[in-house]
Amino acid sequence: MVGIRAPFDAEPAPCGKTVGGESYRDSDGEGFAVWVRYYECGCRRTRHEYHDGSVTATAVKHGRKEGKIFWEEQSGHPV
Ligand SMILES: [Zn+2]
């Protein structure tokens, strides 16, 4: 698996700030893929797609007190 990194333009982060950052994408070419978006403020979003077509996505707010993970519903690819 070869990951691809690319910067992305400012957008609303999980904490509510609008910031840019760097995205990371990786896949095995057979249906499994992972996307991660690292926001400049420290927030993070992840999305996993599995071979059976199921998708999980998480968003993590920056900061220790707000660093809890919560699940997100996403219909489109974030990248
Ligand atoms: Zn943030």
Image (cartoon, grey):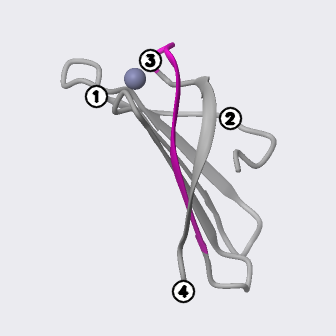
Numbered range of the magenta stretch: 15-26
Q: Upstream in the sequence, badge 1 or badge 3?
A: 3
The nearer-to-camera label among 1 and 3 is: 3
Q: How far across and down, in percent of the image, does residue 6 sit?
A: 58, 57
The residue identified by callout 2 is: 73
Q: How far across and down, in percent of the image, does residue 5 sit?
A: 54, 63
Q: Upstream in the sequence, badge 1 or badge 2?
A: 1
Q: CA distance from mark 2 to mark 3?
A: 16 Å
**Residue 15 image label:** 3
Q: Upstream in the sequence, badge 2 or badge 3?
A: 3
Q: What's under tag 1, amino acid-wise? A: Gly
Q: Which quarter of the figure has residue 51?
A: bottom right
Q: CA distance from mark 1 to mark 3?
A: 10 Å
Q: What's under tag 3, amino acid-wise? A: Cys
Secondary structure of the residue carrying tag 3 is loop
Lateral position of residue 48 relative to residue 15, left or right: right
The residue drawn where x is 49% and y is 15% is: 17
| Residue 23 in the image: above or below residue 62 | below
Secondary structure of the residue carrying tag 2 is loop
Q: What's under tag 2, amino acid-wise? A: Glu
**Residue 1 image label:** 4
Callout 1 touching callout 2 (CB < 8 Å): no
For disc 4, the neighbor class at 10 Å (few under 14, some 14 to 19, many from 20) is few
Which is more toward the observer, 9 or 30? 9
The residue drawn where x is 60% and y is 28% is: 10
Residue extending furthest toward the left: 64
Q: Is mark 3 within 8 Å of ligand 1?
A: yes
Lateral position of residue 76 relative to residue 40, left or right: right
Q: What's under tag 4, amino acid-wise? A: Met
Q: Main secondary structure of the magenta part?
A: strand
The residue identified by callout 1 is: 67
Q: CA distance from mark 4 to mark 1?
A: 29 Å
